[in-house]
Amino acid sequence: MTDNAKEYMSKELNAYCSGIGIQQLSTNPYSPEESCVVEKSNYTVMNKVRCMLQACGMDNRYWGEALSYVVYTENRSPTKALGGKTPFKALFGRKPNIDHLRPFGCTAFVFIDKAKRTKLDHRATKCVFVVYIYYASQHKSYRLVTAILANSLTAVRSSLRKTSYQPTRRKYEDTDDVESTSTTIIPCEQVSQDSVGASTKAPESPISTNQSDQGRVSDPEQDEGAISSDQDSSDSEVEFENPTGLEALSGGHHQVFSVDVINDTPQSFADIKASPNKQAWLDATQDEYNSLLNNGTWVLTDLPPGRKALACKWLWRNKFDAVGRFTKYKARLVIKGFLQRYGLVYLEIFTPVLRYNTLRLVLFLVACNSWKIRQMDVKTAFLNGSLDDDTEIYMVQPPNYVLPAQRAKCANSRRRSGLKQAPRCWYLTLHQFLVGIGFERCVKEVCPYIKRVGESMVLLTVYVDDITITGNNNDDIEKACDELKQRFEMTDLGQLKSILGIQVDVKGNVVTMSQQGYVEVLLDKFNMVDCNPVSTPEVIGQVLKPSKLNPSEVKALNLPYRELVGSLQYLVTCTRPDIANAVRNLSKHLSCYDESHWKQAKRVLRYLKGTKSLCLKIDCTGQVGAFQVEAYCDADFANSEDRRSISGFLVMFLGCCLSARSRKQTMVTLSTAEAEYIALCDLVKELLWYIELLEELGFPQRSIVVHCDNQSAIAIAKNPGHHERTKHISTKYYFVRDQVEKGRIQLIYCPTKLMIADILTKAIPREQFEILRSKMGLADGPTN
């Protein structure tokens, strides 16, 4: 039974309930008494929320944190309904630990890591405690209304003193001292180390650094512990032991805070012990350890004189798909490769990866030819790559997996995640295998591989351990998948649904690419979930000027400006060319920004809030096999403080954006025609790459149509005669004329009102913006 709320009356929910035999009922309007049990609970909780906010003098915007605090406390309080038990005990079968409970709104102090401060900077930040978050650690962690929490803070101390919060001092929720999360921020004064010691009390349960005081986690089975074949049976049991000294601090009190607390991501084995998902994390760790053994990653040996064994560490994280759905628990053992010395244990480390333009091109081929596309993931990919024969790496034994009888030995490792050359070694291993089974690597783009057998073609792309396979013959695709599975341990993910943070939906001749989940993460991360949407990412006539603040004043603003601009640029690169010009403007001020720049960056987030469901839609219905590329080019003359023009171009395929770019030109031009001609040169270079790559893939292009809205620029490119006003143009820009004469490029005039690339050079009115945006191939997609 629901109260007629819209979220419970959707067609999708109705269809789901009907399909499994659930009858939906709803109360009458304005009749909460018909659902009295639920309404009474909400009433009781909200009364407590209101009282706590008023008692602490906090703004009502923090009602969510107060609500979480009330629920957390209520779940650990006895109730008559359960016979005096707490809800926590009724659920987990054990009494809750309440040693960590603190009053809502009390003062807390967070020590700042040495890496984030200088000798004379404050040692801690004064905070306001607002809510508990269960986190796998020896202590429960607190979410603080403060500067953003880092992955690890040295210590946290809280006092029972109530804090009077003044919301009028609030600025944006971030600092440079620590990393960003979605935690709401109340800026409080920073305090020195002396004041922290004077106004706080020590933790009630100090952390022991003695190994004998540490608990142990469950042991693996005996046959899983063998590392070398010449060991006796007594050595085959792996002893789990907790680290000592600084490692114990790192695994315990040092890890009270984490950005990933919501996802219950452990930072140490001590965290795993306290996690409600303990067994899942242990299983993931054991799976990783087993993979290392099965791949023959190391052999235990004595450390040669003069050599130093590199340290290693365990990393854990939750894996999610492109829409934010949890997929699995992941553990990874990595060597601390940053300790490697160049020339001694590594030389070349460059590794090619698939370009996003190429990924979109492959998806365009899939839609155009109605192909199927499979996705595969290589398990522990870097373990499959071997080092050179003359390279030896020595590593200490993995934490908590030390053989009791061989504590003094180290692992002679030839395959290891974390090494600087590990990605390159894996790529070379995969390349050699693919060539061995008949694939050929493309020349213009090294990560697509092609295998042709008669009329059959299989197209394979590689981005580290993410592999996609498509082509015109399903049997050959299946054969390629089987060959990969026989050589490497693979996870067959079936039809491509998500890759590189992009949600992909393939249905016949229609393919959509969306990043709605990523946009929602950004909105939450920068506390813009409840912002008011706007219709355009920029304001017409608004000019962002370099800040007059000096570097120290910019740092004092505590704004995550660079982080946000980088996140927005990732969106532009993948699926959102409509914000390219706005992000280009923001990118000019990464070292000289102020509140005005931050406000404009938040406006882009507000625009994304209202358009998060937009996706690139490739619709080839009725046009199967009609592969035709066209392009649009434009320039905004002298539209910058240094009077340089802005170039913008789009490469389109059947009405959908394949590639887009917004860029300031490198020279000052003397006329609009000259600016347009230089923009044409940038576009033609991009088009030639597409022409040659498509020819390699078996889709040759006779010529590509380029739309330009400047007749003079077209005349300069087509007519080699003498032009008095353009004779000074650099010779390299006549590259366009050469390609036109060869017939590879065909220039066509396009009226300015129909010039799609106009959206990439300047801010334009809403009506025109929405028209051009739709012509780019951006359309509403399915909501998450």
Image (tube, grey):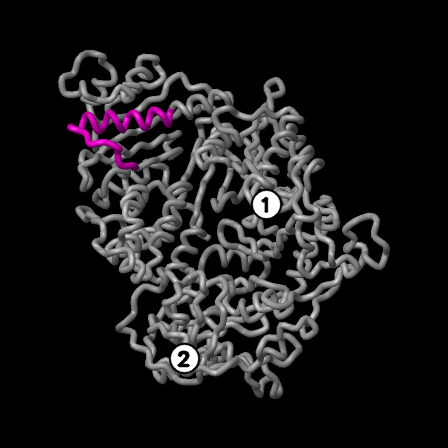
Residue 781, horizontal then vertical, whole percent: 42, 46
Q: In the image shown, does 475 or 171 lie closer to the viewer? A: 171
SS type, badge 1:
loop
Q: Is residue 470 magenta?
A: no
- Is 530 left or right of 222, judged from the image as shown? left
Task: Choose top left, top right, bottom left or bottom right for residue 482.
Answer: top right
The residue that disc 2 covers is 107
- Is 494 left or right of 577, judged from the image as shown? right
Amino acid under disc 2: Thr
Work out whether 433 lies above or below 6.
Answer: above
Residue 5, horizontal then vertical, whole percent: 42, 66
Query: Could you tell me what secondary structure mostly forms the magenta stretch?
Result: helix
- Is 406 left or right of 516, judged from the image as shown? right
SS type, badge 2:
strand
Write the start and end of the magenta stretch as one range: 663-687
The residue that disc 1 covers is 419
Tell me what residue is drawn at x 49 percent, y 72 percent.
155
Category of crowding for the residue at label 1, using alpha-carbon neighbours closer than 10 angstroms: few (below 14), some (14–19), many (at least 20): many
Counting residues from the start of the chain, the first of labels 2 and 1 encountered is 2
Residue 714, horizontal then vertical, whole percent: 23, 20
